[in-house]
Each structure stands twice: as C-alpha cells, then as structure tokens.
Amino acid sequence: MSTGQIPESPRRVLIVEDSVFTRRALVSMVESEPGLEVVAAAGDGEEAIRLALRHPPDLIVLDLDLPRVGGLGFLRWIMHHQPVPVLVVTGARGGREVFRALEIGAVDFLLKPSARASEELLGMRQDLIYKLHVLESLPGARRKQAPRRLKPQAVRKPPRVPRPRAGGGEDPPLVVIGASTGGPPAVQRLLSALPAEWPGAIVVAQHMPALFTEIFALRLDRAVGIQVSEASDGDEVKPGHCLVLPGGQQGWLEKRGEKTVVRLRAQREGERYTPSVNLLFTSAAIVASSRVAALVLTGMGDDGVEGVCRIHQAGGLTVAEDQRSAVVFGMPGEAIRTGCVNEVLSLDGIARWLKRLGSKSASKKTRGRAHEPQLV
C-alpha cells in the first residue's frame, strides 16, 4: 500500500581502487546494501577525476596507492572542485599517507586485508557499510533533505557548574581525551594550541587500528609543542607529556605507589571500541577523582557515555565538542544527553579552555608552590 511518500534516491558511491580483485569486492559489498549505489569504479586517479565529473558522487571510497594521479592528488582535486565525504581504504603500510589524507579532508579510513585475502576482505563489509552510512549523514553528502540534527529537546541541559577560579581549588592536572571519526585532525588541533611548557598530563583514546596509533603519535610529537608518544604497558603519566593509547588494545590508568601508570591488554571478543574511551575515563575517575578533566571529541557511536558520568560523579570536569565543529556528532551528542557534561564548546573553544586550565596551574605554581605538582 502506497504511503504517498517519494522514496529517497540511493546514495551514489564512487569507488577508486587499482586492484581489480579488491575493486570488484568493494563494488559487490556496496551494491548489496539498500540505499547505496555504485555509480562508477576507477582504477587510477586520472580515471577517477573523469568519472567524478561524469557521475558526481555523494560518497567516495578511495585507495591511496594509485597509478598516474595518486590517491592524495585525487583527494586534493575532489576537495577543491566538488567536496564530498571520502572514506579511505588502505593497507597496513599506508599509515603515513592516511594521516595526510585526513588532513586534506578525508573523513575516516578503513584497513583492508592483504591482497587477495578473500575471506578477510569480505569480512570488512560490516565496517565498510557502517562507515558509509555515517558518512552519508554528513553535511557534505549530497542529500535532498538537510542532515538530521540533534533536537534541543532531546538533550538534557548540562548542569551549571562554576568555572574554576585562578585563586581557589585545584585545577585538574590530568586530561583524558576520547575521539573516533574525525579525531586525528581534531586532537592535533587541540595539542597544537598548547605551549611547550603546558603543565598538565594528557592521555588520548582514539579509535584506530593497531600500528596506526604509533604513526599518529610520532606525527603529533613532530607537530606540537608538548611531548607525545604511544603508550606502552607501565608507562608513567607525567606532566607535560601526552600518551596515545595503542590501537587494537584496551588501556586504562592505575595507581602504582605515588605514580599513575597506563595498563594495557589485548582486545577481547565482543569489545566494539578499541581503545575504549569508557575504560580510560572510568579508570581516570578512580585514580584522579575531582582532579581530572575529560574531553569528548568528534566520533560515531556512544563510547565515553559511561566514563563521562563516572568522572562527573567524582567531581571532575567534563567537556564535549559542539555540533558545529564536530565532524560526527555521535559521541559528543550522546555524552551531552547524559546531563553529565559541564561545558559544550567548539574545538577552538576547547583549545582555549585547555590553555586557561594550564595557565591557572602555572600561575599557582609561580605564586608560591616550590614543589612540583603531583598528578594524582
């Protein structure tokens, strides 16, 4: 029976992949999903430009290792001429180019198996389709209707919490950050705003496969003023240092005597998010209570909701990225819905907030603290 509604046309997907085997597999995966349509498939960057002009896509699945015009060259072209959400697919050796692609404008990436690993390749279908459906909801995707926005009435008003004053109380010296889709550029932007002498300690849980977090941490260490490294089991959480939890593992914080350290374990079957923002935040609430600040940045899903509430209950500070600056408003939006978020700020607003936090700690130290501030 007809409802009288006009069905929404499928999202048009352009696939760019030089391997014939992988390209056919990707086309099959996308075509099997209702609401998605492959309008063209290219084997190199030059052909991809021609096909994008002939068949303007809504979404693009892009391999970076391409002949003729390379993947990064095509990405620069598409971002300049007809920007749409781009999902990068890459092998384990393509980590460095992935982060360049995210800086240029790709939204997310997906790790593909080694060549002709047919069982593994077909196993990536669920992640591919999930990410494409997230991308199709972004403002950059061509849609006949505006992207769905979080309704104000669906969000509980965050509690009014007075901002910490420079002259009273202890500023949280430990900052924990959770992010997923769109996170790498956002984290870099935040850390780039901090001076080299920023006094706090930072631990980051960024959803990312194994191997890529090491490259991510190295890139951050070269690009920002504070020291950044990938965390190893037992690493101490120290002022002026940012630790990035390794991909493919779960990480949390523990007390070891007077020190706070990172503990790691392998991902277990059934665990959806790695590294888990909830696990990091919850452990931070235990070891640091009111002296921790949690930042929930852009990302799909709801990881971090439980941890934000635990930190809020412990008296810590919680901040979520607002809808205007978040690439994907899933994680911060879900955190805001809990009513446990103290501040909702743009990414630049969060950067300014962090700088103020550090300045207050530094001014207290200058006014008479002869000893080094303890972390927790």
Image (tube, rainbow, N blue to C red):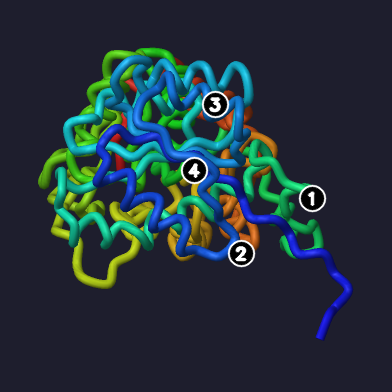
Q: Mark 1 points at which residue?
A: 145
Residue at image position (63%, 44%) is 138
Q: What element carries label 1?
A: loop
Residue at image position (67%, 43%) is 323
Q: Name the residue under label 2.
A: 338
Q: Mark 4 points at which residue?
A: 295
The disc, 4 or 1, on the residue closer to the chain's N-terminal end is 1
CA–CA distance in space, label 2 to label 3: 23 Å
Q: What element carries label 3?
A: helix
Residue at image position (17%, 31%) is 93
Instruction: Identify residue type, mark 2.
Output: Thr
Q: Mark 3 points at which residue?
A: 351
CA–CA distance in space, label 3 to label 1: 33 Å
Whether residue 304 is situated above or below residue 14 in the rendered picture: below
Can residue 231 be seen here? The reply is: yes
User: Which of the image's four quarters has the N terminus?
Assistant: bottom right
Q: Give coordinates of residue 358: x percent, y percent.
A: 46, 25
User: In this view of the protein, which residue sits in the foreground, 337 or 106?
Assistant: 106
Q: Give coordinates of residue 39: x percent, y percent.
A: 55, 44
Which quadrant of the view contains residue 176?
A: top left
Can residue 364 be seen here? The reply is: no
Whether residue 358 is situated above or below residue 290 in the rendered picture: above
Q: What element carries label 4?
A: strand
